[in-house]
Image (tube, rainbow, N blue to C red):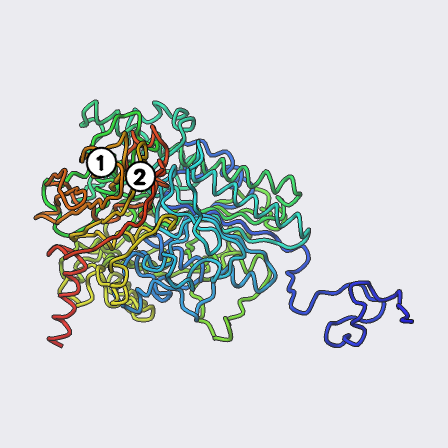
Amino acid sequence: MTTVNPEIPAYARGYENWPARVGYTTGESQPAWPREKRAREGSPNVVVVFMDDMGYSDIGAFGSEIDTPTLDAVADEGVRLTNYHTTPVCSPARAALMTGINAHRAGYASVANSDPGLPNLRLELGDDVQTLPEVLQHHGYATFGVGKWHLVRDANINAAGDKSCWPLQRGFDSYYGTLEGCNSFFHPNQLVRDNTVVELDETPEGYYLTDDYTDQALKMITGLRANDSRKPFFLYFAHTAMHGPLGAKDVDIAKYKGRYDAGWDVLREERHARQIELGVFPEGTPVPPRNPEPFNDVPAWDTLSQDEKERYARYMEVYAAMVDSVDQSLARILDTLEKLGERENTIVIFTSDNGGTAEGGLEGTRSYFSRFAHVPGLPADWVADVERPLDVIGGPQSMVHYPRGWGMVSNTPFRLYKGQAFEGGIRVPFLLSWPAGLERAEGDAGVRKQYAHVTDILPTVLDLVGVEHPYRRHNVETKEIDGSSFAPVARDGSHPSTHPAQYTEFMGHRAFTENGWKAVTLHPPGFPYSDAEWQLYHLDGDPAETTNLAAEHPGKVAELARKWEEAAWANTVFPLVGGNPGDSRFATLAARRPAEEELARPVTLLPGTPRLERYRSHALIAYRAFEIVIDVTCAPGDQGVLVAHGDQGGGYSVYVEDGRIQVAWNAYGEMTFLDGGPLTPGRHTVTVSSTPDLEFRCDLRLAVDGVEVASTDKLWMLVGMAPFSGITVGANRGGPVHWDLYERHGSFPFTGDLHTVRYEPGQQADYDPGLQSAIAWEAAVFYD
């Protein structure tokens, strides 16, 4: 008979001979399991809310009129960093935040939508860099990621792509969001849960992306607490807002009706006055005039027509509603932490990836993907703003962005926008609070004017939670980080900056900031780089860069320009991309690696095939002839979508309705229809073909069993990032290409027998940027 020792816990019985290996000794309470890691008892939770394209003045604590009570409360209980800087665009900022390493050295000189083969444009997180969630996971934190990632090369977002840079492989226990740079707020083109694409037959009624993200974040937090009462968590909540295309709920838009009728000149003055009142800037801080630079200029509001004023005000009402929605989202998260008794011991960080944008152009747009088509050679009659009714702007039937005059307001009081090295592009709001661990001294208003940088977030979080960077990942020694903890500044407003000098570069725009001085260029694309480009500003007294001191201090200009170049060599900034094409044979961002040719090979899709990802789908039709061959059997009364590609931002759909075979072509909101007549019962081969024409136009032909039944020509080609939603067979899942059809039938699944849908990509157009890049590459190799 076996004798049971009652002093040994039940879970350890049978392992009496394992004490040295497991850590048990008779009578001890349960210790940690061998592979279990726990953070220190009482370690704080960390919530990082990372905005997209939000300007410096867009929240109440930085001067905005938008209703942001939750963020204002975070500012009141914590600190505001009024001299915090980021990178000019999003992927580099995300890489810098995640790794603490300067963006170029981390491999992200630009956004993750190119692949020219440069060390600074790998657009992949290397094995020798460690992310913030990986470090915190190493120290026992639960790690949750929600929202926009944009650190995966677009060629790897598809189901067969390498997943080594997907969120779960970079330190997150759970992830829900979009790997892309932007998305529709009503019908997302693609959402990923962990390592799997989320498939929905129908988008739920009333769906809104920010609310969905928030729901998922709350499930992660409450799910953790239901199973572990002590484990601290890290939540990275990366909003797709405020990136275009803009979209908001009707109830939130209505709240701001009429608020922006006074126009951007008045709103900018009002915001700056509030900034001085709040102590963000001292009395007398100069404000530059409306941005006057060519292609960045803003007209006086009073010079606009009444129609323009009404439409432009509506754009900003939508934008304000989105900011309001973000504040509501954070309120829900903090309320949940309050209910769990963890609000006081939670570090909250709120900031943006870059400044407000000018990508809506001078007049804004109701057709975002035609305005966003940054393709060389677009003809003069290219339509970058397809008309839509005023009341649909900001809703699910439109893809919109505000005029750059509102981007100027977002960046109050600074000059210029996202993508540039002036303060408007790189200086953004920053809030930090931790009620239980970061108390302010009496009389301290919490305003911190010391310089800080996005690379400082990782070391600051580690400093505050009290853990060290292991500098090893998968037994590989990792790169030293570039950032410095600004926790001392947060605790003591008189502490000097922990990050006194920093370089900036994007698309040839350069800057170097040191101890309040800044040398900066606004580089015109296509022109040689020149030392004469450098401007000089003393930010301590002129934060908005109103007075160029270069002529008065040539020695300081030369000093900072030299330091920029030293930093550029140390951070693999060279070769500069996007400047003078003669500077480097690598100067084009259109270059792609040969392996991507697989994405443009013919493919047969079966019913039930998950929706193809945007970039993979686009490779089948982009700048080229293509043919879609559909093998289908119809019985009387059968109807539905055979194949759809795109959404309200642009695309096409082939469908049967009321017995007739039809094609809808959505050119960024401008609809064209082909009616092929009745599709008789039986088995048929339906063929849709297109051939590129000159100047980004194409024809469209519909045939049934080899006989052409309808055609048209001179359609605008779908270029850039359109169609944004990928290919679906047997239904129009996701964003609807044809809105009226969607209102009648929803996703409209085909009721007949759809056998196959085959894509046959054809010859590329001469103006295909990828083809031009390949030719340039081959010529460069030949002449080398």
Query: Is residue 618 at all visible to an observer of this figure?
Result: yes
Q: Position of residue 123 (x, y in %)?
A: 34, 62
Q: Secondary structure at mark 1?
A: strand
The disc, 1 or 2, on the residue closer to the chain's N-terminal end is 2
Q: Which residue is mark 2?
A: 641
Q: Position of residue 482 (x, y in %)?
A: 42, 65
Seen at 16% across and 59% down, the residue is 532
Name the residue type under label 2.
Val
Q: How many marks?
A: 2
Count residues near mark 1 (Cα–Cα under 10 Å), then give few for <14, some for 14-19, many for 20+: many
Q: Position of residue 650 (x, y in %)?
A: 25, 41
> Is label 1 in contact with label 2 (beta carbons under 8 Å)?
no
Count residues near mark 2 (Cα–Cα under 10 Å), then give few for <14, some for 14-19, many for 20+: many
Q: Secondary structure at mark 2?
A: strand
Q: Which residue is mark 1?
A: 662
633 and 381: which one is in front?
633
Query: Is residue 81 at all visible to an observer of this figure?
Result: no
Q: CA distance from mark 1 to mark 2?
A: 10 Å
Name the residue type under label 1.
Gln
82 and 203: which one is in front?
203
Q: Position of residue 641 (x, y in %)?
A: 31, 39
Seen at 31% across and 56% down, the residue is 111
